[in-house]
């Protein structure tokens, strides 16, 4: 049903669009697609992320149940993004850790917090069958 050319779309709140652009474009390396007075649209690792100007944010978020991110197929890609986040001084909500150690669903993870406290989790499963 979904074609490789299709993109998943996610909209999130942002207190300050300039800060959001700084984090996602200059920090994570996403591409800025469009900018409007009330939102920015980004190419977020091949999917569409829209940051809408809003004061309705969670100032003390918890990882569960609300977060989003990328599950990398290649460990090298996960390592590269983790190193980039560390080098660029992005805010970690959770430093790299191993989850479900010793089980088939074991995966490496780290979580970033954007300037509006949206939580982004980046994962890599040792067993690719566990991605979904």
Image: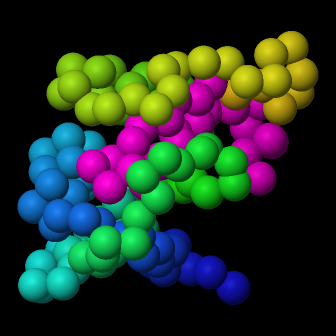
Query: Looking at the image, which residue is at 39% across and 42% down?
Result: 113
Provide residue 43's location: percent of width, then percent of height: 30, 66
Query: Magenta segment range?
Result: 108-132
Residues 65 and 127: in front is 65
Question: What percent of the width, then of the height, locates residue 110?
Answer: 52, 29
Does 16 sit left or right of 86 as displayed?
left
- Up the image or down, 74 lies above or below 131; here it is above
Q: With 128 as the anchor, is 57 left or right in this view?
A: left
User: How is this picture coloured?
Assistant: rainbow
Place residue 33 in its image quadrant: bottom left
Relative height, residue 128 to residue 38 (above, below): above
Q: Residue at x 61, y 57 (%)?
A: 66
Please say whether residue 111 is one of the residues in the magenta stretch.
yes
Q: Quadrant of residue 90?
A: top left
> In this orientation, which residue lies closer to the viewer: 130 or 92?
92
* Residue 71 visible in the shown view: no
Residue at 52% x, 20% y: name it.
96
Find out whether residue 95 is within the magenta segment.
no
**Residue 67: x %, y % from top left:** 57, 53
| Residue 66 visible at all | yes
Residue at 77% across, 53% down = 132
**How far across and how far down the image is residue 49, in percent?**
37, 70
Residue sitting farthest toward the top: 102
Count of labels shown?
0
Task: Please name whichever residue, 120 or 102, is drawn nearer the observer in this view of the structure.
Answer: 120
Query: Is 24 left, or right, of 5 in this rendering?
Result: left
Q: Quadrant of the N terminus?
A: bottom right
Relative vertical location of residue 35 with respect to residue 44 in this rendering, above or below: below
């Amino acid at each position: 049903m979904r074609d490789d050319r299709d993109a998943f779309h996610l909209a999130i709140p942002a207190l300050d669009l300039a800060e959001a652009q700084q984090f996602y474009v200059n920090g994570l390396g996403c591409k800025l697609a469009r900018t409007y007075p009330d939102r920015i649209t980004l190419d977020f690792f091949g999917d569409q992320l829209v940051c809408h100007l809003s004061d309705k944010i969670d100032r003390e978020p918890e990882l569960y149940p609300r977060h989003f991110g990328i599950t990398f197929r290649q460990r090298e890609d996960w390592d590269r993004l983790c190193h980039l986040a560390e080098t660029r001084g992005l805010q970690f909500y959770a430093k790299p850790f191993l989850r479900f150690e010793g089980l088939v669903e074991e995966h490496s993870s780290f979580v970033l917090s954007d300037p509006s406290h949206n939580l982004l989790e980046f994962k890599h499963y040792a067993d690719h069958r566990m991605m979904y």
